[in-house]
Image: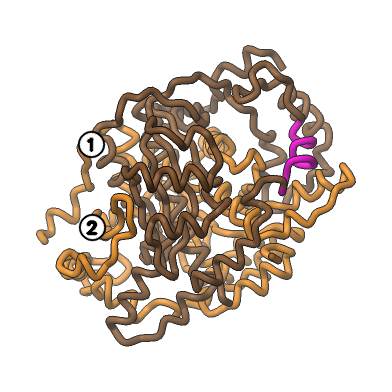
Chain colours: A orange, B brown
Amino acid sequence: MSHHALVTPPTAPVLNETIRTQLAHRTIRAYTPEPLGEDVVETLLEVARHGATSSFQQQVTVIRVLDPAVRAALHASSGQPYVGGSNGELFVFVVDLHRNAVLRERAGVDLEPLERTTLFLQGVEDTIIAAQNVVVAAESLGLGTTYLGSILTDVRSVITALGLPERTFPLVGMLVGHPAQEPQYKPRLPREIMSAVDRYPELTEHLEALADYDTTVRDYYDLRAANTRVDSFSEQIARMLGKGGASMMPLSEVLHEQRLCLS
Amino acid sequence: MSHHALVTPPTAPVLNETIRTQLAHRTIRAYTPEPLGEDVVETLLEVARHGATSSFQQQVTVIRVLDPAVRAALHASSGQPYVGGSNGELFVFVVDLHRNAVLRERAGVDLEPLERTTLFLQGVEDTIIAAQNVVVAAESLGLGTTYLGSILTDVRSVITALGLPERTFPLVGMLVGHPAQEPQYKPRLPREIMSAVDRYPELTEHLEALADYDTTVRDYYDLRAANTRVDSFSEQIARMLGKGGASMMPLSEVLHEQRLCLS
């Protein structure tokens, strides 16, 4: 795999500006101090609102973080240095079943359906649809983004900092800003491993493609470890999975505390 | 709320082709017989692969359904008439922790981290990011889409039809095709209800905006019930939530059968 292939965006048979934007996705973790501007922030929130929503339940709320104390709480939970400071707008995408609970209480009907795993997953879907819409819109404007799954590491402190009631869950944070870095395009698993026709594609039938991919990943130089050879994909999954703080926490406990996923 | 406002796409302060596409999102449930073409299908799969992925775990697999027998199984589970027949390409977005389990088995390390709720949620995020990327790309090409959460109604039959192993879960289906209908833009909850700064926005502080929105939704004419007045949002959430088959099923049982979300 040549170095060239890693600095050229991936391509596809049919291209337009939107698809070029999507194929050129890279996580951006460093931003200039330049603010987004209120027009852009408003636009991103509009795009978040207008994604698909499961059964029209609209189980998502987006919280923009401006208060440095709230940002500090998110920074502390995430442990990621780039969440600190003030570069990049910080948003939190909250799975929100509380709002519909209020509507049901006002109508005098039971709240039990909201405690089901199905409804929570529908809320997660609404939430990520909104978040990914923001990513694509921001990138179409030349901005950079990073998802912050890391805010779950100490999720109870995030719940407190944002004043989140029962039946809500701060699924992901997101930074959006003007890029101050130019990372390489991180190679993805080959299409024949990640997709298939009619039937699940067993990895063991694609070991040659996997070996090629492992080599490709080793040649990808992660900006966070400048010019250091990284592990292959297989090595990363074997060594790193479950080592992070967020992964160590029994999240089901927190979900149950929030009265989510009870059945 | 004028009828006009419901047939004009929503707008935002900053517009480009991508953002216009996103704001103009509508669910399309009827398609012409015209196929997408292999170039478009390949492009959609490329866009699915290149979204963000939590901790580079790439826990998603996309299955394209061509076999009429597999499609019939998905149709039966979903109960949605438009899943039947052959109009529209049908995809299933699968949360996939099995692939990384194979990698860990090959490396001789334990599989326990993959059984945590955290890892499953990261897989759900990867899966919906991929799916939403497909929606935006398809719509940018003038195509229509619909998410099929309904395939969960009889999810065990879907798992069987697609040959899904343990540690996988068919989260959503999706139809993509050439639109054969022109639905209105479905009004979303007001921005002050769905978003806020620094702190969770309690619905009870926005009851006036809610009342306006309820009126707006009553004026939205759903194509599926042609020219019939629909319930307000508040009424829909009070009356309809939890009535569907998918909502009645204890999904946590199926997730545990699949060795997902065990802690």
Answer with the quarter of the image where residue B251 lies. bottom right
- A174 on left or right of A189: right
Residue positioned most to the left: A2
Q: Amino acid at mark 1?
A: Glu
Q: Position of residue A190 (x, y in %)?
A: 23, 57
Viewer-proximal residue among A244 and A262: A262
Viewer-proximal residue among B79 and B15: B79
Label 1 sits on residue: B38
Residue visible at 63% across and 54% down? A94
Q: Amino acid at mark 2?
A: Pro
Magenta span dominant secondary structure: helix
Q: CA distance from mark 1 to mark 2?
A: 18 Å
Q: Tell me: residue A167, above or below residue A51.
A: below
Q: Tell me: residue A162, above or below residue B24.
A: below
The magenta segment is B232-242
Q: Is residue A92 visible?
A: no
Q: Position of residue B120 (x, y in %)?
A: 50, 66
Q: Is residue A125 visible?
A: yes
Q: Are marks 1 and 2 on the same chain?
A: no
Residue visible at 26% across and 60% down? A193
Label 2 sits on residue: A190
Q: Is residue B239 magenta?
A: yes
Check disc 1 and report its element: helix, strand or loop. Answer: helix
Q: Chain of mark 1?
A: B
Residue positioned most to the front: B69
Crowdedness near tag 1: few (<14), some (14–19) or many (≥20) residues, C-alpha within 10 Å: few
Q: Position of residue B260 (x, y in %)?
A: 51, 70
Image quadrant in which the C terminus of chain B is located: bottom right
